Image: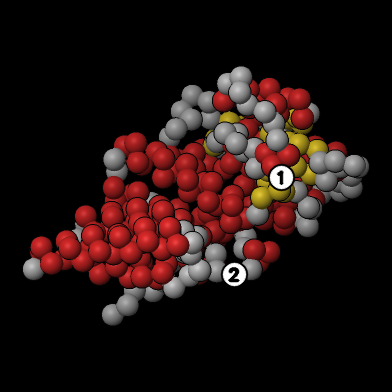
Amino acid sequence: MTAAPHPFDQIVTQPEDRIRLAAAALWYATDEYPDLKVAYYLEFLDALAARVAAHRAATPQERIEALRLEIVENEGFAGNRTDYHNPQNSYLNRVIDRKAGIPVSLSAIWLDVAARLGWPFAGLNMPGHFLICAPGSGEDIIIDPFNDGAVLSRAECSHMGLALFGSDFRLQPEHLAHVGTRDILRRMLGNLHSIYLVRRDWPRCTNILRRMFALRPVDPEIAAELAQLLATAGELAEALAILHSVLKAELPDDKRRFIRQQIDILHHRIAQNN
């Protein structure tokens, strides 16, 4: 009997503008917290949005301040500086429970609340430290939810990049480009993937790669890594199915050869097992 599709995998097949960021993030968290009540956390965020709406903010600056007052001042959400690499910082239910997270998970709360109000806030592609923005008069107003909703100049973003990556860093236009919901989810999952990879926690790494593959079902690297972990766990048929599914997509010749090599390796393993 075929297992029912994971709710996260179903949600992310929708058009981007129909994916609720918080709902998708909570559904991937059910892999780690199977008793998680998604509706409870969405109701919390809806109530938070209602409180922000009560400020009747009209300008971008007023909206940023309304979000900051309710999320930071009244709810107490803050950047987790003392335990930054704790995986709980990337599971939205635990971020809400603990009122602490990393830049991208705290940004997800700001963005979800803003979206409930129809405010056109967006995530930014800043490497190493996720940021968000609100449309200003002429250019975006850049906001740092990890640092209590501070408004940043482009010069401050450049200094942040230099502190993170060293003297070779140069702030580029693409670093402040808007990113969509799928990209934000991919970044959240990518953080967990890195943590579990370092810990060599292969079952959790496999779960995260399943969700990453749902976001990018034609990504050869994700497919190959997921297939390798599944094969190691004895799930050879599923591993092969994933690799074959990638071959159905339009791929560059080198990527297609790479996937075929992975399939040949798995067939060899199956033959050895028999």
Residue 213 is at least partly visible in this image = no
Q: Amino acid at mark 1?
A: Ala
The colouring scheme, among rainbow, by chain, secondary structure or one colour, is secondary structure
Residue 185 is at least partly visible in this image = yes
Q: Residue pushed farthest front? A: 253
Task: Tell me the residue at 57%/25% (across/down).
Answer: 165
Sooner in the amino-acid sequence: mark 2 or mark 1:
2
Local packing at callout 2 (Cα closer than 10 Å; few below 14, some 14-19, many 20+) is few
Task: Tell me the residue at 76%/36% (across/down).
Answer: 142
Disc nearest the viewer among 2 and 1: 1
Which quarter shows the C terminus? bottom left
The residue that mark 2 highlights is 14
- Residue 2 lies, in percent from the top left, at 32, 77
- Residue 42 lies, in percent from the top left, at 59, 57
Q: Quadrant of residue 145?
A: top right
Q: Quadrant of residue 99?
A: top right
Q: Amino acid at mark 2?
A: Gln
Local SS, label 2: loop
Local SS, label 1: loop
Residues 207 and 251: in front is 251
Q: Whole-Å distance between the Cαs marked 2 and 1?
A: 23 Å
Is residue 159 rendered to the left or right of residue 218? right
Task: Tell me the residue at 36%/66% (across/down).
Answer: 242
The residue that mark 1 highlights is 177
Residues 37 and 17: in front is 17
Which quarter shows the N terminus? bottom left
